[in-house]
């Protein structure tokens, strides 16, 4: 190695100067150089320039010029412990149960309190197999969600080094392809048009699924009729069930089995072989109408002028008038009941209402009406409320844990967004307004889209849980500020935050306001987080 | 008078979370997560400086930590953790470059050939002080793999000559030569970039005047 002065015969060369600066020069040479440089301007300048260069290089190399990419940030973080998966399934079950208990339970209770204990009104209404046949958009949503979940699950098995845009695109492309496959053709005949008419002499030897603004069945459906429409008129014959979602459903013909569904007005002038189970604003059973089984309904007003083979089980908000005959027991919860002179009630009559029933002298009753005054302000029992609160709390906490372990990046982004709460609140409020508008449009104005509308409503629940998690974490963080907390600490903070929300949420008026703010803020934070997460790779690319 | 000093890269200067490292060695996955969060950014930057593309750097960062996790019981706690970390990282990146035949620099060339050109100290100082970090890094990207690697190992990872010799597979006595030549190549690259920029700047100025 050349460590002598070269063409500058009186000076040290660059190599020697560098080795000196690096502490790599033997002691005697270093001493020699130091003594020389003290008097030699050129060598002093050389040492200074090299030193500056070294520092400049260190500076340039250690400078933070780009953030750590998301896939690297999330890689090799503590993997969810083995118990996380069973916990996740537990969470899913708890969330489903909480939804059931929180949403459906109270209605169930109300019906049970009306004296219908044991008659599974809602189970019959909602969970009868045929009900789901027509709910295609809901099923599509569920299937799509399942496929996306499957995609995310599959993605978690992709080695981290392969988690590039192209692989993500391939997986999600595959999922989309799966979703895009035409569903195997069902047995039912499916129609969708502005207006559908089954002519008088036409017979469909199959189930008929039909949607449109106006549906008229004058012919025969040898199977079930599933219908979504603004106005439905059945003058013909349906040998199976009628499952309907409509603004007006009018039956002048014959339905051999049951009528089930939700509608604004049900007008019955024909006959139904078995039972009618519906939710409607108004139920009108004409003089010539006949129901072989029972009528079970939740309605605003009910007029029973026809013939009921068995019982009447109803929750009627305002007025119920009975002028026809009822073969079985009558159990009714409502405001007012009038029993006209032509009424023939063969079974016992139980009425829980705001006022004594008006019974015409000419009415034939097997026994006097058993009346119970209803307290209008009756609410769910406090024990039930407590159970629901605990369930909701548990479900939100578990969902939070799941989010922290599976999607820590998203969780952090949501928490950050919640910290700048005015923006999150604004976004959340705007979203809710749009959401309500969409639901209104799809459910109320265009009744055809009721399935999609319900799906939109159903989507609200997971989002509402997400909202609680972000706001809860933010609150917890405000109460217990910890520098770079572990998952355990984060969970603890979430638990505390949620507890505060639940506690304040129990206060009568303040509670409603609190929940409103929590939902707006949380939804806003979630959306901002999604937006930021989707923007992040682009930012990194730009920096690179 | 300039004293003989060893420039220290920022990553090594950061206090090491020894307790967490010890926990991670005992198999605590939470602690390992902490270690990852602590060191991943520095290792990512190291890989970013050494490897040709950002995606290569991302992959390498993750692979290095996978290796580290497996090798964690080989780490001797009485030595600095970051030094060990950079050694693993350097070996991994160098292997990557070799495997992908990206080391198409003049490796056949004798490593003991000292650059003959003796720079003018004032010009040299001007060159380094006038260049921004981004310009230096861009110039670094144009260098042959070994030159780039040597500079990063020395001035980013703060490795000593023994460690650099080990990582690059050269004799210790030649490390200085490799470094000096790398510096010369970097200066040339920066000058070249400056020259391509200057005509444009002059052009822009003439436009501004008109």
Image (tube, rainbow, N blue to C red):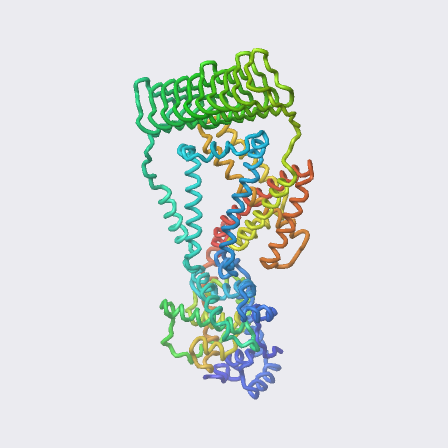
Is residue A117 at least partly visible in the picture?
yes
Q: Residue at x 49, y 61 (%)?
A: A76
**Nearer to the camera, A41 or A543:** A543
Residue lying furthest bottom in this view?
A: A28
- Residue B43, position as x, y percentages in the image: 51, 66
As displayed, is residue A1 above or below residue A365? below
**Nearer to the camera, A158 or B175:** A158
- Residue A67, position as x, y percentages in the image: 53, 58
Q: Residue at x 45, y 14 (%)?
A: A288
Is residue A423 at least partly visible in the picture?
no
Q: Residue at x 45, y 24 (%)?
A: A293
Q: Quadrant of the N terminus of chain A?
A: bottom left
**Nearer to the camera, A173 or A93:** A93
User: In screen coordinates, is B107 left or right of B139?
Assistant: left
- Residue B104, position as x, y percentages in the image: 37, 69
User: How many numbered discs sit on the rendered protein?
Assistant: 0
Residue lying furthest front in this view?
A: A366
As displayed, is residue A17 above or below residue A229? below
User: In screen coordinates, is A472 left or right of B84?
Assistant: right
**Nearer to the camera, A255 or B80:** A255
- Residue A436, position as x, y percentages in the image: 54, 33
As displayed, is residue A117 above or below residue B77? above
């Amino acid at each position: 190695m050349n460590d002598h002065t070269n063409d500058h015969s009186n000076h040290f060369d660059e190599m020697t100067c560098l080795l000196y600066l690096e502490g790599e020069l033997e002691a005697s040479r270093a001493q020699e150089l130091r003594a020389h440089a003290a008097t030699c301007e050129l060598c002093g300048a050389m040492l200074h320039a090299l030193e500056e260069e070294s520092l400049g290089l260190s500076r340039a190399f250690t400078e933070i010029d780009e953030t750590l990419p998301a896939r690297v940030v999330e890689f090799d973080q503590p993997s969810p412990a083995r118990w996380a998966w069973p916990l996740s399934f537990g969470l899913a079950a708890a969330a489903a149960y909480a939804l059931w208990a929180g949403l459906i339970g109270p209605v169930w209770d109300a019906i049970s309190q009306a004296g219908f204990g044991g008659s599974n009104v809602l189970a019959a209404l909602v969970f009868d197999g045929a009900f789901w046949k027509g709910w295609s958009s809901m099923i599509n949503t569920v299937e799509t969600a399942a496929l996306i979940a499957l995609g995310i699950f599959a993605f978690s098995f992709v080695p981290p080094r392969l988690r590039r845009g192209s692989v993500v695109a391939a997986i999600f492309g595959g999922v989309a392809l799966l979703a895009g496959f035409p569903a195997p053709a069902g047995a039912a005949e499916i129609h969708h048009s502005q207006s559908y008419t089954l002519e008088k002499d036409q017979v469909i030897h199959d189930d008929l699924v039909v949607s449109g603004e106006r549906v008229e069945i004058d012919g025969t459906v040898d199977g079930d009729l599933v219908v979504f429409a603004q106005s439905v008129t059945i003058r013909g014959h349906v040998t199976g069930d009628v499952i309907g979602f409509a603004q007006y459903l009018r039956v002048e013909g014959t339905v051999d089995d049951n009528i089930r569904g939700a509608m604004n007005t049900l007008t019955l002038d024909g006959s139904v072989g078995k039972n009618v189970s519906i939710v409607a604003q108004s139920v009108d059973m004409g003089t010539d109408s006949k129901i072989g089984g029972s009528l079970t309904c939740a309605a605003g007003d009910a007029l029973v002028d026809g013939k009921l083979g068995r019982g009447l089980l109803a929750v009627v908000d305002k007025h119920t008038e009975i002028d026809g005959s009822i073969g079985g027991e009558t159990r009714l919860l409502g405001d007012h009941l009038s029993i006209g002179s032509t009424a023939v009630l063969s079974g016992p009559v139980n009425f829980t209402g705001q006022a004594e029933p008006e019974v015409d002298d000419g009415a034939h009753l097997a026994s006097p009406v058993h009346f119970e005054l209803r307290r209008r302000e009756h609410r769910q029992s406090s024990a039930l409320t407590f159970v629901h609160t605990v369930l909701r709390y548990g479900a939100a906490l578990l969902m939070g844990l799941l989010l922290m372990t599976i999607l820590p990046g998203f969780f952090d982004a949501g928490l950050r967004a919640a910290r700048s709460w005015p923006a999150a609140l604004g976004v959340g409020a705007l979203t809710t307004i749009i959401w309500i508008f969409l639901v209104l449009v799809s459910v109320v104005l265009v009744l055809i889209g009721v399935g999609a509308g319900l799906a939109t409503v159903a989507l609200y629940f997971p989002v509402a849980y997400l909202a609680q998690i972000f706001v809860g974490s933010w609150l917890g963080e405000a109460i217990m500020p910890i520098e770079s907390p572990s998952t355990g600490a984060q969970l603890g903070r979430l638990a505390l935050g949620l507890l505060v929300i639940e506690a304040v949420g129990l206060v009568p008026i303040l509670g409603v306001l609190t929940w409103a703010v929590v939902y707006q803020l949380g939804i806003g934070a979630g959306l901002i987080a999604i937006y930021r997460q989707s923007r992040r790779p682009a930012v990194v690319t730009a920096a690179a | 008078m300039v004293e003989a000093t060893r420039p220290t890269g920022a990553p090594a200067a950061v206090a090491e979370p020894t307790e967490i490292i010890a926990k991670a060695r005992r198999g605590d996955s939470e602690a390992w997560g902490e270690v990852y969060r602590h060191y991943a950014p520095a290792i990512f930057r190291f890989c970013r400086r050494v490897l040709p593309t950002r995606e290569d750097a991302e992959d390498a960062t993750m692979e290095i930590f996978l290796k580290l996790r497996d090798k964690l019981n080989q780490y001797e706690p009485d030595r600095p953790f970051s030094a060990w970390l950079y050694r693993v990282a350097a070996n991994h990146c160098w292997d990557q470059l070799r495997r992908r035949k990206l080391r198409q620099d003049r490796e056949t060339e004798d490593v003991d050939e000292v650059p003959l050109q003796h720079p003018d100290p004032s010009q040299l100082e001007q060159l380094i002080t006038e260049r921004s970090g981004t310009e230096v890094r861009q110039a670094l990207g144009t260098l042959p793999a070994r030159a780039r690697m040597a500079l990063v190992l020395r001035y980013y990872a703060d490795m000593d000559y023994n460690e650099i010799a080990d990582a690059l597979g050269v004799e210790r006595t030649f490390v200085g030569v490799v470094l000096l030549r790398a510096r010369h190549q970097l200066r040339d690259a920066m000058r070249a970039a400056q020259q391509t920029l200057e005509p444009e700047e002059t052009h822009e100025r003439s436009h501004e005047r008109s």
